[in-house]
């Protein structure tokens, strides 16, 4: 028996305590040591507490700063929420001591301060001076945000440029100068003693097609691809360099292996599958929320804010909610009482639940017909609605019509149309007596299916809502219940509760949609909100309030590049219609247009998941250089382990450059590693992902001196400086002297990152009503004195104090009073929601030639050729399903913060009692877990909070890099730290799609997002 097993046996612990024993064993040992588990602290009263950053006279209320400490407002990037935080800094040691919340930021504070509040007064507010008393005055960082400051001083950081020595992936490196790094990457040559490697100068050929037989793929310059993690506030610089300067079309972020299916499904409802807008519940005002495939307060984005608002709404008695998820999470606990409920569900079957609810709504007349009946913005305004949908618009359903799946337009009826047919001026149509007519400013029929006459002859049509209703009614409620594992009576109860609060009820989802049916699952869930009619309403769903953008403002234009390149060509990820390709035209001419050689995803955004199939298989083309910017697809994409041999082969991808502070699983396979700044050392501006109803721009600036090496000119080496140096050596437009235009037509230099970001701060400060100039006291109290020389040297005398305000307060934040206007959100979505999305409904699957359904619906998981996954991997052989769940502490890149490992040191897999009984398992047993994609061995925890037939794995562990393996630099070996390798990664179980012609991971067939929820599996005790 393992030590963990013995701990639990001795304590006679079960359930949640079993989880504590397996994952928190070190903590448990320390708890029983007595008052002090180690060295006796300096003070019996305050322990080893840090010196306070300031003090306040209890009589006068005056604030006195600690001269040894600086407190600055900045941005945390411990996760993708990017909260505003306040950073406590030891001035002498240039060290971050502690991180807490920024009281101006709604991402960290419930009742955030009015932006006009002086910085000194914001410190007082955090000390609960005056009216701000009690918990409402708190501004917090989460557990991870408090811990990841350790990454700044992580001894395994990359501080100097590295070049590989020996084979790619061997773990052997040498340090080189920044100047050598830039020269070799730009100019190429026999860089590794393996033969000539083309440099960027050669690859940047804007005239020669990357494929002579397929000119639509664009120029050779598309052979440079950049995969970034998230927009951490520096995307505008990345895109300026890659697209406008270099001329490549291939830039992508990590969304397709994060929450891409949810975003794509939401994008289908909102009518934009490329930008993928979405809404969140109005947590403070809602009366009932159904969470499906997300763990509020445990995960989601912004998870800290959501958790705080949810707890408050629950405790005040305003909100009830239900969490539907294969794994019980922090959102439902004993103190929640009857206000919260957890419902387990069969992994990946969320669409069955959603369509069961929708069926019940149709059957019980709970669909908001007055809202759905408005066919246009004018009609909605006349009816007093805050938004409208295309539920009444007619869709061509005639199988013989060339435009089947498209909306019937005015030109189809012979109406005179300004401009081209099917353009923006060509009206959509609605059912009318005797046929159809253009949508107008009054309500239209919701239900119609039949034949109408047109000048070209009769055409079968139906309204979008009729098609949705038919889809919902295609299965019985009992069928939906059987598919998702939730009783029909429970589905009906959920539907009843959702539709019993007017518009103050909502459905929310997120990462749980990353299944083989994720796109339609997400679209179906979000469609419930449309049927309720809750968008833009207080207590319903609301969009993000937006932000104050830095890139194009009233003073400087950071988006425009003189003599810019306009990239051309189809993208590497194949997220465009297959019918645009030469391959399709040739196949069609040969009489067999389908199947394509590879899947194409016309209704998806950029797809990092498909990049590797493309670049390693050459379809549609390969790449000559891959840049990885703070990205780790090797760890993040399930199933990619089966493709790494080709990625290690320089003959397949000749040049890989990683820009990263650490050697992670992906940068370990690079040829060069460029150091990057970490957390509180870098520049940038970010906006909330969603969930904040007011405008927010969070500023990041170097509140400490970066620890990275320097260029020959003494500039810190980071992502931005690297791109600037490459651009200047290659003479790319948009960099160097005369690069940044201002509103008066003057041009300014871009030679250092601050040339760019300080001017961005002026834009942020100047939008709308400009912010007030920072006072000397604001600058001194906030530590902005550290960048005062840069502010004054880069900006004009009439600008720099406005920019200083942005940094002194950690960004720009619209006041909380601007969140609502009466019963509506102040910032509202103005475009129609798509009950029927013709872009989806008219598109053909490139592998089957079949059209996709154009409404929400429940679809069982399939592979690329349309065959059910269960047909390849039957339940008799693979009886279980594997899912992942988010940790509130760890993520894919936080493992280096060892304080987190002291709290949760590993991640045993979780199963419920039924699975445990069927397989003879007990907590602490070693098990072998297998899927068609791989297997792993680990410990198991048995608890009741896991759905039947499910195996759950916490994300963020099982690393092979980040210090989990030996690294040699300049002949010096840094041995692996076994703590950093602890646990397992669910993505090691990820699968390839067995139906594809060339290797590619299993992805959702519409969104192209990787599948990590619902992997077929089996388990056995070792």
Image: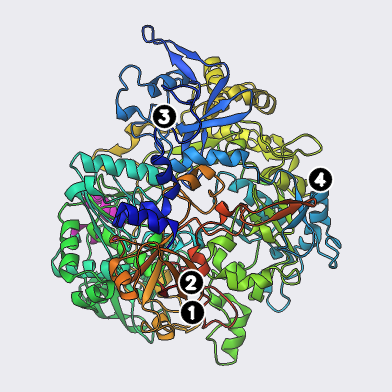
Image quarter for residue 466?
Answer: bottom left
Mark 2 and mark 3 in contact (Cβ < 8 Å)?
no
Mark 4 vs mark 1: which is more N-terminal?
A: 4
| x and y, in percent, of residue 827 in the image | 36, 43
Residue 424, image quadrant: bottom left
- Closer to the N terminus: mark 4 or mark 2? 4
- In the rendering, at what x and y percent does residue 593 appear? 54, 87
User: Which badge, 3 or 2, is on the more N-terminal residue?
Assistant: 3
Q: Are marks 4 and 1 in contact (CB under 8 Å)?
A: no
N-term mark: 3 or 4: 3
Q: Mark 3 or mark 1, which is nearer the start of the sequence?
A: 3
Q: CA distance from mark 3 to mark 2?
A: 41 Å
- Give the residue pinned by disc 2: 1003
Pointer 4: what residue?
A: 177
Q: CA distance from mark 1 to mark 2?
A: 8 Å
The reply to whether callout 1 and callout 2 are in contact (CB within 8 Å) is yes
Secondary element at image label 2: loop
- Give the spatial CA distance, label 4 vs label 2: 41 Å
Other residues around mark 3 within 10 Å, as few (<14) / some (14–19) / many (≥20):
many
Q: Secondary structure under badge 1?
A: loop
């Amino acid at each position: 028996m393992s030590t963990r097993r013995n701990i639990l046996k001795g304590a006679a612990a079960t359930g949640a305590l079993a989880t504590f024993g397996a994952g928190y064993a070190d903590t448990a040992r320390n708890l029983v040591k007595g008052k002090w588990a180690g060295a006796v602290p300096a003070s019996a009263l305050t322990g080893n507490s840090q010196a306070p950053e300031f003090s306040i006279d209890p009589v006068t209320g005056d604030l006195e700063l600690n001269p040894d400490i600086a407190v600055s407002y900045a941005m945390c990037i411990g996760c993708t929420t990017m909260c505003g935080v306040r950073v406590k800094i030891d001035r002498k040691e240039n060290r971050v001591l502690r991180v807490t919340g920024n009281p101006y930021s709604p991402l960290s504070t419930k009742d955030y301060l009015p932006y006009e509040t002086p910085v000194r007064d914001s410190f007082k507010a955090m000390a609960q001076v005056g009216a701000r008393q009690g918990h409402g005055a708190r501004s917090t960082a989460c557990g991870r945000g408090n811990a990841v400051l350790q990454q700044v001083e992580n001894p395994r950081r990359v501080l100097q440029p590295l070049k590989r020595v020996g084979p790619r992936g061997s773990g052997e490196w040498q340090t080189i100068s920044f100047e050598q790094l830039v020269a070799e990457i730009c100019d190429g040559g026999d860089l590794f003693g393996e033969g000539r490697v083309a440099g960027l100068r050669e690859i940047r050929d804007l005239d020669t097609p990357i494929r002579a037989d397929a000119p639509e793929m664009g120029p050779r310059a598309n052979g440079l691809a950049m995969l970034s993690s998230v927009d951490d506030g520096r995307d505008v610089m990345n895109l300026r360099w890659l697209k406008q300067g270099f001329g490549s079309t291939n830039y992508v972020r990590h969304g397709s292996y994060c929450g891409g299916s949810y975003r794509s499904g939401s994008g289908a409802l909102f009518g934009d599958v490329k930008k993928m807008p979405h809404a969140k519940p109005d947590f403070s005002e809602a009366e009932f929320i159904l969470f499906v495939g997300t763990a509020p307060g445990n995960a989601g984005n912004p998870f800290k804010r959501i958790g705080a608002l949810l707890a408050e709404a629950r405790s005040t008695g305003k909100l009830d909610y239900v969490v539907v998820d294969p794994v019980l999470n922090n959102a439902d606990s004993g103190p929640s009482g009857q206000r919260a409920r957890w419902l387990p569900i069969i992994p990946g079957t969320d669409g069955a639940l959603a369509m069961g609810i929708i069926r019940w709504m149709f059957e019980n007349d709970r669909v908001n017909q007055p809202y759905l009946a408005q066919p246009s913005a004018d009609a909605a305004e006349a009816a007093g609605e805050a938004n409208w949908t295309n539920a009444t618009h007619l869709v061509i359903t005639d199988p013989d019509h060339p435009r089947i799946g498209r909306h019937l337009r005015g030109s189809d009826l012979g109406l005179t149309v300004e401009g081209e047919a099917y353009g923006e001026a060509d009206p959509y149509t609605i059912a009318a007596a005797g046929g159809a007519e253009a949508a107008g400013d009054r309500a239209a029929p919701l239900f119609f299916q039949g034949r109408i006459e047109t000048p070209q002859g009769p055409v079968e049509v139906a309204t979008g809502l009729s098609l949705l209703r038919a889809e919902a009614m295609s299965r019985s409620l009992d069928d939906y219940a059987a598919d998702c594992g939730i009783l029909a009576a429970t589905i009906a109860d959920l539907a009843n509760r959702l539709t019993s609060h007017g518009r103050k009820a909502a459905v929310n989802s997120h990462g749980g949609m990353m299944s083989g049916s994720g796109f339609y699952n997400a679209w179906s869930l979000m469609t419930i909100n449309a049927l309720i009619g809750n968008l833009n309403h207080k207590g319903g769903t609301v969009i993000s309030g937006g932000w104050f953008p830095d890139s194009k403002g009233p003073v400087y234009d950071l988006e425009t590049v003189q003599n810019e390149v306009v990239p051309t060509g189809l993208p590497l990820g194949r997220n465009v219609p297959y019918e645009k390709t030469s391959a399709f035209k040739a196949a069609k001419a040969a009489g067999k247009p389908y199947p394509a050689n590879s899947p194409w995803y016309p209704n998806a955004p950029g797809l990092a998941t498909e990049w590797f199939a493309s670049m390693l298989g050459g379809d549609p083309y390969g790449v000559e250089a891959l840049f990885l910017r703070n990205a780790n697809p090797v760890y993040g994409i399930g199933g990619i382990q089966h493709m790494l041999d080709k990625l290690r082969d320089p003959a397949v991808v000749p040049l890989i450059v990683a820009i990263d502070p650490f050697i992670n699983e992906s940068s370990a396979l690079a040829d060069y590693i460029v150091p990057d700044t970490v957390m509180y050392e870098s520049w940038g501006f970010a906006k909330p992902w969603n969930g904040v109803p007011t405008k927010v721009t969070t500023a990041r600036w170097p509140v400490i001196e970066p620890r990275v090496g320097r260029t020959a000119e003494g500039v810190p080496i980071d992502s931005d400086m690297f791109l600037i140096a490459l651009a200047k050596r290659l003479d790319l437009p948009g960099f160097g002297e005369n690069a940044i235009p201002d509103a008066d037509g003057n041009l300014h230099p871009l030679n250092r990152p601050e040339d760019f970001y300080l001017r961005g701060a002026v834009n942020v400060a100047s939008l709308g009503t400009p912010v007030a100039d920072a006072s000397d006291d604001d600058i001194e109290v906030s530590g902005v004195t550290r960048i005062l020389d840069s502010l004054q040297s880069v900006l004009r005398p009439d600008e720099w104090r406005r920019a200083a305000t942005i940094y002194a307060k950690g960004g720009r934040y619209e006041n909380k009073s601007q969140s609502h206007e009466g019963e509506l959100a102040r910032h509202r979505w103005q475009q129609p929601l798509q009950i029927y999305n013709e872009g989806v409904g008219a598109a053909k699957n490139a592998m089957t030639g079949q059209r996709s359904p154009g409404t929400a619906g429940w679809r069982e998981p399939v592979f690329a050729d349309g065959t059910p996954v269960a047909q390849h991997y039957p339940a008799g052989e693979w009886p279980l399903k594997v899912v992942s769940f988010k940790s509130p502490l760890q993520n894919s890149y936080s493992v280096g913060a060892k304080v987190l490992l002291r709290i949760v040191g590993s991640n045993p897999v979780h199963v419920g009692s039924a699975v445990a009984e069927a397989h003879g398992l007990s907590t602490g047993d070693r098990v072998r877990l297998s899927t068609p994609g791989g297997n792993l061995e680990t410990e198991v925890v048995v608890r009741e909070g896991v759905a039947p037939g499910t195996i759950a794995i916490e994300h963020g562990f099982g690393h092979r890099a980040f210090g989990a393996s030996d690294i040699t630099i300049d002949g010096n070996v840094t041995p692996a730290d076994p703590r950093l390798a602890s646990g397992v990664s669910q993505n090691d179980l990820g699968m390839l799609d067995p139906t594809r012609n060339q290797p590619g991971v299993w992805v959702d067939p519409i969104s192209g997002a990787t599948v990590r929820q619902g992997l077929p599996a089996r388990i056995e005790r070792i």
